[in-house]
């Protein structure tokens, strides 16, 4: 009686350099990874660009761009008859250069290239988009769910954006779906906005479901804080980034209620004559440091008179001190 081990798919394997995962998985687009894996799998075979493009459902020029990317990273080197794995010495030389010469600049260039890929508008033909969907069940699912969100078939620009996000930027389809859902939650669903957000997420290493869930929660909390402060202050314009940061800190970091923020706002307007986020921030920072979290505590801190909406308040010593500090910072 004979015995054999059924290895299934493990019966045929090929090597992938560790640097692909350790160094480049975050910056390499999905198409670049697909091309590298395909050529590694067929190492030693005479594979042309057109053959690889057909097998991967890609364009010839995209396959060529991917090969050039890996050549620039030092994993492949061009030869008379195509591309071959770079010599170990060359790879080590590249790694040493990255570690000792200009690692920050190199990383900045890579991030800039990634953002450029995100913001550009490649024109994929309907057939190319259909081929992409046909070759990847997850992309197919992403498109179907997005159509339900929009309540209609996707426009060509929206289809382009999704393919750019998943292929050029390299964001997994399930994370891209969370990104689209977030964009809908804040009422900004243009293709350009989605691609900008995708580039920002990848730069911040938000490329897994768990990381995306945590990051979306923080973004939604910040957006909610922004809307709360805009309503309290009667702001009908877009907030600056600094004003958004103030709002997020007051509500999500320090935990102040809308009522307490409105009290600080009234004190600010009475003292300064206009809304000043830095001044309100100084009041709330003082309260945060002293553990003041209720209107009654604020009343005692500010001369014993409970602040009310539209009331005229006398400046306490604390108010004058905060006002003087603010003027020095102007």
Image (cartoon, helix red, strand yellow):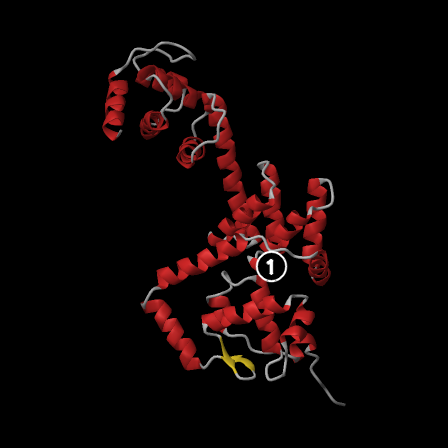
Above/below status of 123 relative to 66: above
Task: Please tell me in which quadrant of the rendered image residue 67 appears.
Answer: bottom right
Q: Is residue 15 above or below residue 245?
A: below
Left or right for 295, reference 290: right
- Give the camera-side residue of 289 and 140: 140
Q: Is residue 256 in view from this perspective?
A: yes
Name the element at disc 1: helix
**Image-based side of 60 in relation to 231, left or right:** right
Across and down, in percent, residue 278 comes to: 34, 29
Image position of 289 with respect to 168: above or below: above
- The picture places residue 195, in percent across and down from the top left corner, at 56, 49
Residue at the bottom extreme?
A: 1
Task: Tell me which corner region of the image, top left, top right, bottom left or bottom right, holds residue 168.
Answer: bottom right
Residue 171 location, quadrant: bottom right
Q: Measuring 26% from the left and 20% from the top, which residue is drawn there? A: 318
Q: Residues within 10 Å of mark 1 (few under 14, many from 20)?
A: many
Task: Tell me: 328 left or right of 173.
Answer: left
Q: How many marks?
A: 1
Q: Residue at x 25, y 19 (%)?
A: 320
Residue at point 54% right, 75% down?
Answer: 16
Q: Which residue lies under the disc numbered 1?
A: 167
Does the rendering let one see residue 170?
no
Relative to residue 212, is residue 113 depicted above or below? below
Picture quarter with the C terminus: top left
Residue 64, horizontal then vertical, whole percent: 57, 70
**In this picture, residue 64 sits left or right of residue 274:** right
- Residue at position x 52%, y 32% from top? 224
Q: State which quarter of the image contains the N terminus.
A: bottom right
Front position in the image: 87 or 67:
67
Q: Position of residue 274 (x, y in %)?
A: 36, 19
């Amino acid at each position: 009686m004979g015995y054999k081990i059924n290895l299934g798919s493990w019966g045929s394997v090929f090597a992938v350099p560790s640097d692909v995962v350790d160094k480049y998985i975050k910056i390499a687009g999905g198409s670049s990874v697909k091309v590298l894996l395909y050529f590694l799998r067929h190492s030693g075979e005479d594979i042309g660009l057109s053959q690889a493009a057909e097998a991967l459902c890609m364009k010839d020029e995209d396959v060529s761009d991917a090969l050039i990317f890996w050549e620039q990273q030092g994993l492949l080197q061009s030869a008379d008859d195509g591309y071959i794995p770079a010599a170990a010495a060359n790879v080590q030389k590249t790694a040493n250069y990255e570690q000792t010469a200009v690692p920050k600049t190199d990383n900045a260039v890579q991030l800039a290239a990634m953002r450029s890929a995100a913001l550009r508008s490649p024109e994929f033909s309907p057939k190319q988009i259909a081929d992409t969907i046909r070759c990847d069940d997850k992309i197919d699912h992403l498109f179907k769910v997005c159509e339900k969100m929009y309540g209609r078939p996707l426009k060509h620009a929206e289809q382009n954006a999704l393919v750019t996000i998943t292929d050029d930027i390299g964001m997994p389809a399930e994370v891209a779906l969370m990104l689209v859902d977030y964009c809908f939650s804040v009422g900004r669903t243009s293709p350009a906005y989605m691609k900008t957000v995708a580039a920002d997420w990848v730069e911040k290493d938000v490329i897994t479901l768990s990381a995306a869930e945590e990051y979306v929660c923080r973004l939604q909390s910040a957006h909610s804080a922004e809307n709360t402060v805009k309503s309290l202050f009667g702001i009908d314009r877009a907030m600056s980034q600094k004003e958004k940061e103030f709002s997020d800190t007051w509500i999500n970091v320090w935990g102040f209620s809308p009522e307490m923020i409105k009290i600080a706002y009234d004190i600010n307007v009475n003292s300064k004559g206009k809304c000043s986020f830095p001044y309100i921030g100084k009041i709330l920072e003082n309260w945060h440091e002293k553990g003041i979290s209720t209107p009654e505590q604020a009343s005692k801190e500010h001369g014993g008179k409970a602040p009310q909406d539209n009331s005229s308040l006398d400046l306490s010593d604390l108010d004058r001190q905060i006002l003087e500090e603010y003027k020095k910072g102007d």
